[in-house]
Amino acid sequence: RRLVRIEEDGSRTPMAITVPSPCMSGDKERLNTPNHLLYTPWGNLIFVDSLSCDATDDGKATTSGAVYRIQEAVNVPALPVSLSREAHSWNDTSSGETETKEPELLYNGMDAVYGVTLSHDLTSLFVSGVVRGNGEDVRALIVKLPLDDDDDDDDDDEEKEEEEESSDDADKKITMEDSITENTADASSSSPMGILDSKSKVFYDVTPHIHPSCLSSNNQKEETPLFGAMAVDSSGNIYMTYTDGVLIIDSLTGRHIGTIPFHSEDTHHDDGALLTCTKEDDEEEKEIPTSIVFGEDGYLYVTTKHTLMRLKARVKGVAMPTNLVVPSKK
């Protein structure tokens, strides 16, 4: 339940232990299930997490998915080995001897967030996750967050101004009635606004590609998300893992242009989804993709719960210009 950077000598530098609560303004919470992360070309570290919120009026526990950013994380000095083990007992990075900046809430508009990636032109973030409606209705979505030139230079005054404006808006969460072309970020009086919430748009609805049993509340409690890891190629196509394989989506048009299947045709169902998430006692566990990345060797690498696989790719992954030089140790 923490985010650390492993140094060349094996020591571990804590980057984030607590984050701003996506449920209540002003609160901090311990990281819950952080998974996908990335460094931007500007040296900032972006990662996602889904945290539990208080129960609703009907007694049901709720979750909130959020995207966080640590400004200039690349400039955090490495911890020496002598302090690395001591850092395992820290309950917050601010309680230790690091110079890590506090994570900031970048996006807070879903019930659970499973993946994040940068667009090939570095102008937008794509975020995958789910939004729950009434009853068992769940939508699986990819949301697009446009990045402005000054997004990485927001000062405290601008953040305070955004928070004040957010208090006058209506419910922030994406609703089941939203069109996939409508703006998805409003704000509630209790849930804090992320910096990019007001710019968010639903980019692609993944729901038709996933069997309803995989989106039920029971299966959403799985430790490993059933979809949402993403990689981008040099042409701007998004490769996203899901229960049946890998979807390929044109990031310019939002059109589904291809699929890399992981399962045989005899697993098809009448509703168009390939794989259910209801397992019989004698049924062999299916391999569901959990992560994806383009290698510099010309292969597309995909992991499942038990396996690392690779596929020869005809395209290259997006080139990410970075200068991620970690400062020398104290």
Image (tube, rainbow, N blue to C red):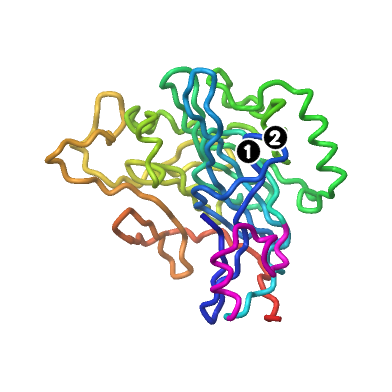
Asked if disc 2 and disc 1 are in contact, CB closer than 8 Å, the reply is: yes
Image quadrant holding the C terminus, namely bottom right
With 55 as the anchor, is 211 left or right in this view? left
Residue 22, labelled with which disc? 1
Q: Is 175 included in the stretch rendered in magenta?
A: no
Q: Amino acid at mark 1?
A: Pro
Q: Is residue 165 left or right of residue 43?
A: right
Q: Looking at the rendering, which quadrant does residue 308 occupy?
A: bottom left
The image quarter in which residue 286 lies: top left
Sequence-earlier tag: 2 or 1: 1
Circle 1 — which element? loop
Mark 2 lies on residue:
192
117 relative position to 77: left or right:
left
The answer to which of 2 and 287 lies nearer the viewer is 2
* Gap between marks 2 and 1 measured at Cα: 6 Å
Name of the residue lying farthest toward the right: 157
Q: x, y (%) of residue 265?
A: 21, 38
Q: Amino acid at mark 2?
A: Pro
Stretch of the chain drawn in magenta: 82-101
Which of 94/295 is in front? 94
Work out whether residue 97 or residue 126 is closer to the camera in this orientation and state it: 97
Q: Is residue 230 visible?
A: yes
